[in-house]
Image (tube, rainbow, N blue to C red):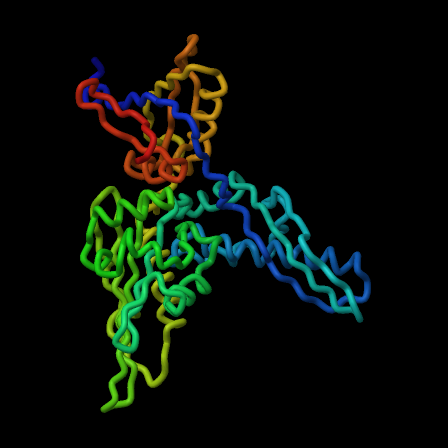
Amino acid sequence: MINFFKNSFFVIIFLWFNNYVYADSNIYLIQNNKISINQKDILEARKVSKQKAFRIALERLFERIVPQDDKDLFYKFDDTDLTKFVSDYVIKQEDFFNEQYNAIIDVNFNAKEIQSFLEKFDVNLNNAISEDFLVLPIYYHSNSYYLWEKNNGWYFSLRKNYDKNELLKLFFPELNLLNKFKISYKDALGENKEALRKILLEYNKRSAIIIFLKEKYDFEFENYVSKVEVKIFVDDFFYDLADNENLRENISKKNEVDYLAFQTLKALSKWWKNKITTKYKKNKEFDKYLILVEFEKIEQSIKISESLEKNPYVSQLVPKEISKKKIFYELFTHGSIEKLKLALKSSNLDLKFDEKLEILKVVKSK
């Protein structure tokens, strides 16, 4: 029997499951950078647009992975050729007419180069993609509640304002009145776990976010009075999103559903970043764990190791001992076990402690 606490490492046994799902999202891929410049020559236009796209994409990358307090580091790149930080790029769309060049360019940054640069400044990093959260947008408007109805304006405002490039992945189910037999607005607001499990099973998700906008019109003062409440359902527990001044009682002369949707999504993004932010450490400061991978086929071990290597908290994975159906690795990480678990969720995996064996296992998320 292995004693983790005396030996100060974890042994993790990886169990293989059919229909194994991997996150295919690339944190360092910044898509749909729109460029528009005046230029007589198309070749020169492409050259200038490429550099402009790199800079726009880099700023968007900083918005994604660097905490607010450290975003001024972006200006350290002002006189730098960004080419070495780019793995590849794709011009998805372009047109050139009357010396006006327009293009949409995807830029894929080199993660190691970016991290190496940020390490010099001892910066924190936000670089773990979440699992898909099922969104249940409830709208109280004109004395009526809306959830699955086609005229749920709150649903459309949230979906319109949601940026798919965010690290927090949200899934908006199609509006379908039949779904209210699985979960109604009363079930959601009343924190009915059984109903939530049903709708999560329907869409093959594990976690949900209930976003409730209550909007009333004050005829005396001729104002809209609105308030947003957010509940997060994870691992069969409810959590309230911390108070945000932009989500408290909002009073305005006009309907501000779009503004509230934008602020709500911003607050949720901040919540996720607070969960995943970790200090990037020098090599000597990495935590080291011993990892045991068990498998039936070699393809399984390869996929498991690839999943680990893509985990943003794993700095290095070193094979130490290999046998027919087992591989021991040394894993170096700058994150905690809890953060490793968070990142594994996007691959439909979870870490569970086996009390009988006194070890951690990676199991398929329920």
Tell me which residue sits at (28%, 46%) in the image.
Answer: 198
Q: Which of the 4 image quarters holds residue 328?
A: top left
Q: Residue 244, relative to residue 183: is it above or below?
A: below
How many numbered circles are shown?
Answer: 0
Tell me which residue sits at (48%, 53%) in the image.
Answer: 165
Q: Position of residue 279 (x, y in %)?
A: 35, 43
**Frontmost residue, 135 versus 179:** 179
**Frontmost residue, 179 versus 113:** 179
For the C terminus, which image quadrant?
Answer: top left
Q: Residue 217, relative to residue 213: is it above or below?
A: below
Q: Residue 122, can we see it?
A: no
For the N terminus, which image quadrant?
Answer: top left
Q: Residue 225, relative to residue 137: is it above or below?
A: below
Q: Position of residue 157 (x, y in %)?
A: 41, 67
Q: Residue 147, can we see it?
A: yes
Task: Point out the residue furthest to the top here.
Answer: 324
**Residue 20 left/right relative to 242:** right
**Residue 155 left/right relative to 90:** left
Q: Residue 323, relative to residue 44: is it above or below?
A: above
Q: Position of residue 236 (x, y in %)?
A: 22, 43
Q: Which of the 4 image quarters holds residue 223?
A: bottom left
Tell me which residue sits at (41%, 36%) in the image.
Answer: 347
**Frontmost residue, 12 versus 86:** 12
Q: Position of residue 42 (x, y in %)?
A: 79, 60
